[in-house]
Amino acid sequence: MKATLERKEKRGILGTALKFSILLIMGFLIQFFVRETYDVGVIVALLPALVYCFAGFHYWRKGFFHFILFSLISISFFISLKISFDLGFYLNSVISFVSGVLFSLAYGRLFTKEDYDWLLLFGFGMVWTILAFNVFDRRDWILENALNVPFVILVLFVARWFRFSKTSYVVMFLYMFMNVIGSHYTYSLVPFGIWLSNFFHLERNHYDRIIHFCYGLLLAYPVRETFMRVGNYKGFWALFAPIMFVLGTSAIYELMEWGIVEIFMADLSVAYLGTQGDIWDAQKDMFLAGIGSVIAMFVTATVIVAFKGKFYWKEIKESFKVNKTPLGEVAITEMSAKERSL
């Protein structure tokens, strides 16, 4: 009994330390990018960072996903309003913070835990609407959203019979938010990518490469959840199949890009394809998506091993067991024999 209490106490201490560490890192990043974006002093930039840390800790005490909802809404609103309308620092900070608080209050009082996806969807809809103003190239924006909008509609439609976990909805929100930023500017002109290029002395804007990497990193987990719950994948194959799916769909996307530009809008090839003079752009994009999915599945496996240990290794081994019934011509012969016997 005493040992159990000591373990719980240690976990509580480690959990609190982890919260403070994450909040401090987030606070540092917020003040850093506020200074880079608005050219304000350290003291002024610290104000939204400290407010975020205190509010984040408050909502984390209510639940981890409560904290995530507040963070996603407040930060995405801040970035979107800055991009589309370039609001002043103080006005943007207040609107973004109030938006995060309102969504958190709605989650705690008006919506149940099962409605988390609807709140995220509503938040993404508002962010998408904000970023639809003052876009750099309207024709390219329409082309880019020809995939973004159907994806959101598909997720909304399948929610009637297949609801993802909150983790999956969060990573999908992150990926789609990054996508709509790219479509607002065209990927090769996103300021964050330009800032990265200047900061690390790179030759090109790598924002589109980041998006392809995040396609694997962020969407491999929802794909894994789908394979497990619909296809009944287990063990090794539940980790391997999402990687193959990401690589396969990445190749399909590159082929679609090529086909759309060749057939419909050859004059938009530079803005839409975003190759920036790299003849191996498509191959590098697919490679990065694959690497992202491998990292996602490695993290997933690590977390599962930490909780399930030897039971998960047993599941991995069992997933390699061979079904003794052969297929191919043997299966055709058996089916033909059954049909004749009827």
Image (spheres, rainbow, N blue to C red):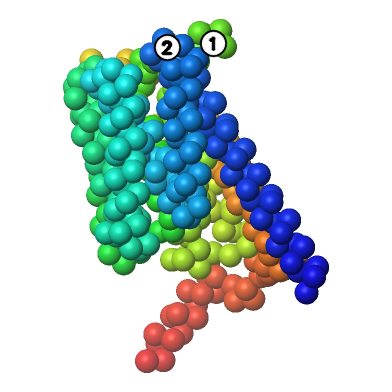
Q: Residues within 10 Å of mark 2 (few under 14, many from 20)?
A: few
Q: Quadrant of the N terminus?
A: bottom right
Q: Which residue is mark 2?
A: 40
Question: In the image, what residue occupies the spot 33% across and 43% down?
Answer: 101
| N-terminal label among 2 and 1 | 2
Mark in front: 2 vs 1: 2
Marks 2 and 1, how far apart in space?
A: 19 Å
Secondary structure category for the residue under label 1: helix
Q: Is residue 7 left or right of residue 88?
A: right
Question: In the image, what residue occupies the spot 55% across and 42% down?
Answer: 293
Secondary structure category for the residue under label 2: loop
Q: Nearer the viewer, residue 296 or 4?
A: 4
Residue 199 badge: 1
Among the 4 quarters of the image, the one containing residue 163 = bottom left
Q: Nearer the viewer, residue 243 or 168?
A: 168
Q: Is residue 325 above or below residue 317?
A: below
Question: In the image, what residue occupies the spot 42% across and 11% down?
Answer: 40
Query: Whole-percent x and y of residue 61?
Result: 50, 52
